[in-house]
Image (cartoon, grey):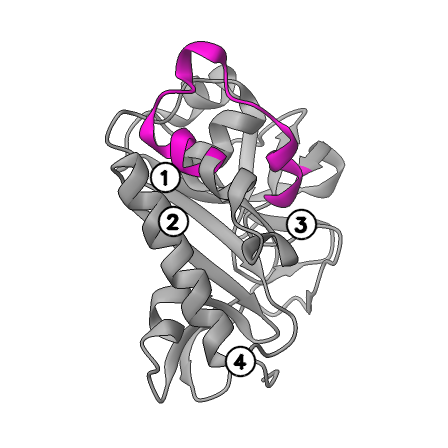
């Protein structure tokens, strides 16, 4: 998140790994606790769509790190959700069962998503789904993407895949992007954290892994840190 609230728990409070919610899950909230120095747009955005996106950060027991989305790319606010305020959650893969509003289905990001969902067998061997603006719109039913929006995906890959599979995934997404006239970016969820599919496909000796305790370069993201 571009701006982040101070934690509502002690700096030295023990951190816990909350298994009920994972990075990129969308949380529907009963309330969003106000915090000091909260950006002025947050209350209006939350009233419009009472959701927050789980982010990669460690939290103390009873809290989840999440972010609120505003109307523009610059409006992103990292905060801390009390678990008692969570009404429901949606994972990226659960959003594949949802269709965009009929009048929104022709946007490039949704065209690319439909093409991938319907025709790419290799992708469908994994648990995967939309994140970012497309995922947010599917979950909230609030118009969020624009004609120029990219499609962001999360692909869960708990076990190491061979290079041919990684390359085939990368090419499948590139074909869908070309067909729809947009960009398709995928993050691979590994035991170490999230890794860009593009980095894996490039065959780099070390890739950037984003985890709850920070980002780091690793040689093997399937080896938990």
Q: Secondary structure at mark 2?
A: loop
- Give me the disc on residue 1: 2
Q: Please check the rendered image and state whether residue 176 is part of the magenta-colored stretch, yes or no.
A: no
Compare marks 3 and 1 and give the one earlier in the sequence: 3
Q: Is residue 126 visible?
A: no
- Position of 225 relative to 5 (above/below): below
Compare marks 3 and 4 and give the one earlier in the sequence: 3
Compare marks 1 and 2 and give the one earlier in the sequence: 2
Q: Please check the rendered image and state whether residue 101 is part of the magenta-colored stretch, yes or no.
A: yes
Compare marks 4 and 2 and give the one earlier in the sequence: 2
- Residue extending furthest toward the top: 103
Observer-side mark, 3 or 4, equals 4
- The secondary structure that most of the magenta stretch takes on is helix
Question: How busy is the neighbourhood of tag 1: few (under 14 within 10 Å), some, or many (20 plus)?
Answer: some
User: What residue does disc 3 label?
Assistant: 63
Report the front residue among 225 and 191: 191
Q: CA distance from mark 1 to mark 2?
A: 6 Å
- Give me the disc on residue 44: none
Instruction: Determine contact: label 1, label 2, CB under 8 Å.
Output: yes
Residue 196 on image: x %, y %: 40, 65
- Give me the disc on residue 76: 1
Compare marks 2 and 3 and give the one earlier in the sequence: 2
- Give me the disc on residue 162: 4
42 sits left or right of 17 in the view: left
Residue 203 on image: x %, y %: 35, 82
Q: Which residues fall within the magenta stretch?
A: 90-114
Q: CA distance from mark 4 to mark 2?
A: 33 Å
Instruction: Determine contact: label 4, label 2, CB under 8 Å.
Output: no
Q: Secondary structure at mark 4?
A: loop
- Position of 89 relative to 54 (above/below): above
Report the front residue among 103 and 178: 178
Report the front residue among 197 and 60: 197
């Amino acid at each position: 998140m571009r701006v982040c609230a101070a934690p509502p728990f002690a700096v030295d409070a023990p951190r816990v790994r909350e298994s009920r919610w994972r990075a990129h899950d969308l949380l529907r909230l009963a309330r969003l606790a106000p915090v000091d120095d909260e950006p002025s747009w947050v209350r209006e955005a939350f009233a419009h769509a009472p959701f927050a996106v789980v982010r990669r950060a460690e939290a103390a027991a009873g809290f989840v790190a999440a972010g609120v989305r505003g109307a523009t790319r610059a409006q992103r606010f990292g905060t801390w959700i009390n678990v008692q305020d969570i009404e429901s959650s949606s994972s990226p893969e659960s959003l594949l069962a949802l269709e965009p509003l009929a009048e929104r289905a022709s946007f490039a990001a949704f065209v690319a998503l439909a093409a991938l969902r319907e025709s790419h067998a290799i992708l469908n061997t994994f648990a995967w789904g939309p994140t970012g603006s497309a995922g947010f719109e599917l979950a909230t039913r609030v118009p969020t993407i624009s004609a120029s929006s990219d499609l962001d995906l999360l692909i869960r890959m708990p076990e190491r895949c061979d290079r041919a599979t990684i390359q085939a995934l990368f090419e499948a997404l590139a074909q869908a992007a070309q067909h729809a006239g947009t960009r398709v970016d995928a993050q691979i969820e590994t035991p170490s954290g999230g890794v860009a599919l593009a980095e894996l496909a490039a065959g780099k000796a070390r890739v950037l892994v984003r985890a709850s305790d920070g980002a780091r370069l690793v040689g093997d993201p399937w080896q938990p840190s």
